[in-house]
Image (cartoon, helix red, strand yellow):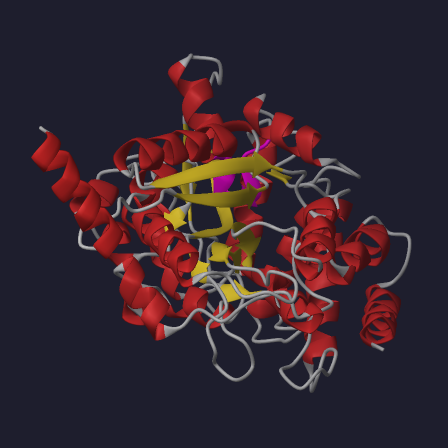
Amino acid sequence: MKLFTSLAMAALLSGAMPVMAQQQTITWWDFFAGGDGARMKALIQQFNDENPDIKVNATTLEWGTPFYTKVRTSAAVGQGPDVMTYHLSRLPMGLKEGILTPITDADLQIAGLAKDDFYTPALEAAKGPDSTLYAVPFDIHSTVLFYNKNLLKGTPFLDAEGNLTGIDSLEKFEAALAAAKANGSTAPISYATGDDGGVYRVFYTLLAQQGGELISADGQVLPGDSADKAVRAVEIMTKWAENGWQPEQALYEASVALFTSGKSAFFFNGAWEVPTMVDLSAKNELGFEWGVAEIPTLLEKHTNWADSHGWAVPIQGKAEMAPEKREAVMKLIGWMEKHSLDWAAAGHIPAYKPVATSPEFAAMKPNSNYAGLADRATYDPRSPVAGVASPTYDAAVNIIAPAIHGYMPATDAVDQLRAELEKAMK
């Protein structure tokens, strides 16, 4: 025993005995609440259980402006997280603030990922102007079209299996709205007509379907004939209001309630509301059959608004993150991507194609019904004044919403929109 102890001590002093690797502790910030929050907490717990060499300490902060303000101020002084969730639509603002670090090819290799693993629209939204990657896309969450099958019975807009059909133009969609109203729908198309996000996403989808741009890559607001296309988008939404097809000044919760109570035949909202419908249906609390599909091609182009949650690594003040810590962060990101099927249950489309194209995701209904939009989605303009909780969203609720409710002509609204965004960019 004494000989063994002496030899062990000698080996330790000589550096020959292997030293146990120190556990890496990762500080994580996200903004996920409700069902999203529960799913993410479960994923973090599973990761911690499977990776004893890495410990994730997670904190959930308030979504939107409060989250991004805290990230900016904390990262600048080295008090921010090691990794955080980040809307890709906010990436231009993060780059302007100088708080994001590049994601290198070596980082991706450590994570077991490659750029080709991701859908092109999401990957491009994660890059800076010089094509440097600054985030790893995790999902694609987009506007989709929920529909009430009961209110469409007897119309040409349901096929024999009860799936939405025959809507490939604005005219046919509006015919479906009229038919639903005749069938007793009091608000044939519901969306958050009094909220920034609801108004912006419908407006931006209609603009994008015309090939219009809100802000060009070189910073022009409504370049070329995009102002005319923006006017057309506002006029379409105004017509829906004038015909009594959409609710007046509906806040988000009210817009959801109109659909779940059976008053609306159609519902424009994010795919994140799919779990709401699934849960209510499972409890027999809907009172009608429902479906969900991609936003139809109402105008010239098959596309719609989308954003992504991604993983970003902020600066550490003036310090550099230790290589061992960054390696642990990238292993965490890679693990999350490969386990994103669990996250997809929240209605999102995995941005990581090996999961999105798997038989398991194909069997996940109704989510896989609208998975094709991942290749066709139009992301917010690559501008610091665009994205979640930005001046573009403010302009939607302050300018476009009043216009679609008849308080100003569409042309005046678009003129004001341009002026407000140009002012925000100065």
* Magenta stretch holds residue 267: yes
Number of marks drawn: 0
The residue drawn where x is 80% and y is 51% is 397
Residue 426 in sight in this render: yes
The residue drawn where x is 80% and y is 57% is 400
* Magenta stretch holds residue 374: no
70 up-or-down from 226: above or below: above
* Residue 291 image position (x, y, % from top left): 40, 35
Residue 150 in sight in this render: no
- Name the one closer to the observer, 334 or 404: 334
* Residue 292 image position (x, y, % from top left): 42, 40
Q: Is residue 380 left or right of residue 162?
A: right
Specify the quadrant that holds the N terminus. Answer: top left
Q: Is residue 9 left or right of residue 366?
A: left
Res. 367 image quadrant: top left
- Name the one closer to the observer, 320 or 152: 320
Specify the quadrant that holds the C terminus. Answer: bottom right
Res. 14 image quadrant: bottom left
- Name the one closer to the observer, 95 or 248: 95
The residue drawn where x is 23% and y is 55% is 15
94 up-or-down from 163: above or below: below
Q: Is residue 116 left or right of residue 82?
A: left
Q: Start and end of the magenta stretch?
A: 264-273
136 up-or-down from 19: above or below: below
418 up-or-down from 356: above or below: below
Res. 252 image quadrant: top right
* Residue 349 image position (x, y, % from top left): 38, 49
The residue drawn where x is 41% and y is 63% is 323
* Residue 233 image position (x, y, % from top left): 68, 64
